[in-house]
Amino acid sequence: MNGGKKVNLMKFNQLGDNRGHLVVIEGCKDIPFEIARIFYIYGSDKEVVRGQHANKDSEFVLINVSGKSKVKIYYGNSEEIIELNEPHMGVYIPKMVWKEMYDFSEDSVLLVLSNFKYNPDEYIRDYNEYLALIKD
Ligand code: TYD
């Protein structure tokens, strides 16, 4: 399905001193892929549910660089809810994982890194189609 890769909670090093904090993320070093795409999500209300898709190619690392949100992920038979609430904390999501992001705080800025450029054709937005694909 995705080569046995697993959803993985990550803690990045905080290079802090009395001037504040700095987090570095280098492709294939701090995360398991080279970065081809960056986007960020902000201004989503508490009731909004985003995502609701799986990807045939793209892998992601999600980081709430400000505020917090929750990510519900479903793959195979397991469901997991992760709260992202620290700027040096991320979650790695391999391909073919169904994900939903919700419960955004007002100050939430959710940074997303991916190994592929945007291609709408690799997004599976129909849950039943996703279930059928992971069954095979
Ligand atoms: P969408 O995938 O619905 O966002 P989310 O998964 O956070 O709910 O994307 C919203 C819009 O942005 C949609 O019109 C597609 C566009 N988009 C891009 O053009 N490039 C991208 O890399 C992403 C993630 C979205």
Image (spheres, rainbow, N blue to C red):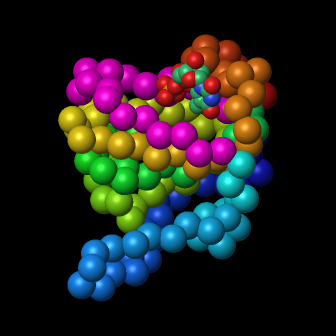
Report if residue 45 lies within the magenta region: yes
Q: Which percent across, then down, holds residue 2?
A: 74, 45
Look at 77% across and 51% down and name the residue there.
3
Left or right: 14 as drawn, with respect to 20: right
Which residue is farthest bottom? 17
Residue in the image at 46% along x and 46% along y:
111
Q: Quadrant of the C terminus?
A: top right
Q: Residue 101's image quarter?
A: top left
Res 70 visible: yes
Q: Quadrant of ligand 1?
A: top right
> In the displayed structure, would residue 116 be above or below residue 45?
below
Q: Nearer the viewer, residue 53 or 73?
A: 53
Residue at 68% from the left image edge and 54% from the top image edge = 35
Whole-percent x and y of residue 59?
A: 66, 46
Q: Is residue 79 left or right of residue 82?
A: right
Residue at horizontal 40%, vertical 80%? 15
Magenta-colored segment: predominant secondary structure: strand
Q: Which residues are magenta?
A: 37-55
Q: Taking 40 as reference, is 134 above or below it?
A: above
Q: Quadrant of the N terminus?
A: top right
As drawn, is 67 to the left or to the right of 37? left
- Residue 109 in the image: x percent, y percent? 36, 43
Quadrant of the rendered image containing residue 77:
top right
Q: How many marks do you count on the picture?
A: 0
Residue 13 within the segment the image draws in magenta: no
Camera-side residue of 136 and 21: 21
Q: Which residue is nearer to you in this view: 35 or 71? A: 35
- Decide if residue 60 is in sight here: no
